[in-house]
Amino acid sequence: MQPLAPLGRLCFLRRALFYAQKRGVPQRRAPLKDDDTMAQLWPGLGGPAINYISDAPDERWRATTPRGLVLLGSTGSIGRNALAVAAAHPQAFRMLGLACARNVRRLAEQALAWRPPHLAVLDAEAATALRALLPADYRPRILIGSEGYAELAALPEASTVLSAQVGAAGLAGTLAAALAGKVICLANKESLVLAGDLVRRVCASTGAVVLPVDSEHNAIFQCLAGRGQEVARLILTASGGPFRGWSGESLHDVTPEQALKHPNWSMGAKITIDSATLMNKGLEVIEAFHLYGVPPERIKVLVHPQSVVHSLVEFHDGSQLGQLGTPDMRLAIAACLLWPRCEPVNVPPLDLTAKPLTFHEPDEQAFPCLGLARQALAERGGRCVVLNAANEAAVELFLAHKCAFMDIPRLIAAALDAHRATKPGHHPFCAPLDGAAPEDQGAGLAQEAHTLAERMQCLDRQSRELVYALARDGGYSC
C-alpha cells in the first residue's frame, strides 16, 4: 500500500479512530485460564521478565474456520505474500476486504482472484479507475479514503486484520482494528514505534490481539512460547544489508540503485533502504520494547549475513533459543494468519549445509541510525515520532537523488537535536498521556487517542518540513 501524503497521514488516523469509536469499544476478551493449552504457546504468561503487549486470541477465534480476513496494504510485498499464504490454504480464510492506495491495476487483479465484498483505495480518482477494471458481474463496495480504510479495518464480520501498510500511514489501520477488538497480524512496525504505549492500552481495553509478522519478532514470539520468568535478553538479527562491512567513508557515494539490492530479502523500497542504513533494526528495537515489555538494555542486535537465524532469546542460565528458517516472509505471515497451527506454505525447507552461519557486532560508527533509534527510545518525549518522520523524509529524498546515503543519519540527528532544543513545556507531544485508566471502555480512551493523534500530526509535520529544508539548504551537521 502506498503511503499517504505526509500532511494527510495523521488526519487519516484521527478519522479512523473516530469511525472505530462509532461502533463502540468491544468488551475485553475473557482471559486465558491457567490450564488453557494456549498458555503453552503464548509468550511470557506469568512474567515478569516478559510482559507481552496483548493476551492470546480467544477460543472462538482459534476454532473459527474460515477466518474473516482483511488485508490493509494488499498490493505491497507483505500483502502479496499474505495472499500466497491464503491461496495455499483456501479453506482457512474468507477474504472480506483488500486495500491499497493507488496501485489499482494490481488491486483489480487481486480482487478478481478473490472477489471480496469490500475494496478500499485512497481517493475518488483511484476508485473510478478501479471500477473500470472490474467486470460487470463483480460489483464490490469500494470504500474511499481515510473513512474507508477505517471501516474496512473495523468490519464486524472480519476477525483478522493484516496491517501491512508502509511507514507512519499504517498506524491508523492498526488502531482502528485494535479499537474494534480484532486479531491484528502486525507487519507495520511504525504502529508501535509511534504509539506502542497507546496500542498496549487499547488491547487491554478491547481485547484486541497483536501477532507480530516481522520475521525477527515472529521468531522471538515463537522462542518465548510459554516462557517468561527466565529471559535475560532478546537478540535481534540483522542481515547487514548490501553494504555490510563497508566503512563510513566508502558509503558516501553509494546510489539508490545499489542500496535497493538487498542480498537476501525481496522487500519494498523504503524498508530496503532502512535495511541498508540499519534504521530498520533500530525501529525493530523500539518495536521489541513495546511488544515484549523489556527494557532497551536487554535488547541486543547481531549482524547475521545469511538471514537464517531470524532472532534468538537468551535465558538466565546463558543458553539461547533461536528460530531458523528459509528467508521467506511467507513463513512468518503464515505463523500469524494460521496461529496456532503450523502449516506448509510452499517454502523450500532450510538446508543447513548450504553455507556457514556467522554473526558479528554491528558497526554503529559506519551505520549510526541504529544508535539514533536507541537514543530516541531512551529519551522518549516524542523523539520516536521525530525519528520516524525524519527517516521517512530522508529516505524519500535519497530515493529521489536529492541527498546522499550518509545524509540520512545526519538529517535524522539534526531533527532530533532540534526537538531536544525545544523549550521545556513547549513540546507538541508527550506519551503516554495521563487520564484514562487501562480498563476504560469509551470516551476516555477515544479522547486520549484523538489528542495523541493531533500531537503526532504536528510533530510529524514539523520534523518532515525541517528535514526537507535542511536538505535543500545543506545547513545541517552532526
Image (cartoon, grey):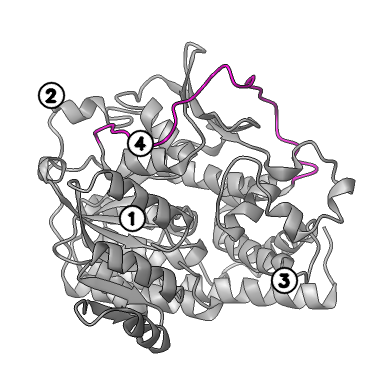
Please name the residue that numbered disc 3 is placed on.
400
- Disc with the residue nearer the chain's start (2 vs 3): 2
- Disc with the residue nearer the chain's start (1 vs 2): 2
Tell me the distance, in whole angstroms, between the alpha carbons under discs 1 and 2: 29 Å
Few, some or many residues within 10 Å of mark 2 (<14, 14–19, 20+): few
Give the residue type that dot 4 points to. Asn
Q: Quadrant of residue 424?
A: bottom right
Give the residue type that dot 1 points to. Leu
Tell me the distance, in whole angstroms, between the alpha carbons under discs 2 and 3: 55 Å
Tag in front: 1 or 2: 1
Tag in front: 3 or 4: 3
* Residue 435 or residue 6, whichever sits in front: 6
Tag in front: 4 or 2: 2
- Disc with the residue nearer the chain's start (3 vs 4): 4
Please name the residue that numbered disc 2 is placed on.
35
Disc 3 + disc 4, Cβ < 8 Å: no
* Magenta stretch bounds: 340-367
Tell me the distance, in whole angstroms, between the alpha carbons under discs 1 and 3: 30 Å
Please name the residue that numbered disc 1 is placed on.
162
Tag in front: 2 or 3: 3
Which mark, residue 51? 4
User: Quick one: quadrant of the C terminus?
Assistant: bottom right
In this view of the protein, can residue 346 be seen by the observer? yes
Name the residue: 35% across, 25% down.
228
Q: How many marks?
A: 4
**Residue 85 at what x, y percent from top left?**
33, 46
**Residue 68 at what x, y percent from top left?**
18, 56
Name the residue: 63% across, 48% down.
275
For residue 298, side relative to residue 474 (left or right): left
Name the residue: 64% across, 73% down.
464
Based on the picture, tell me whether residue 458 belongs to the magenta stretch. no
- Disc with the residue nearer the chain's start (1 vs 3): 1
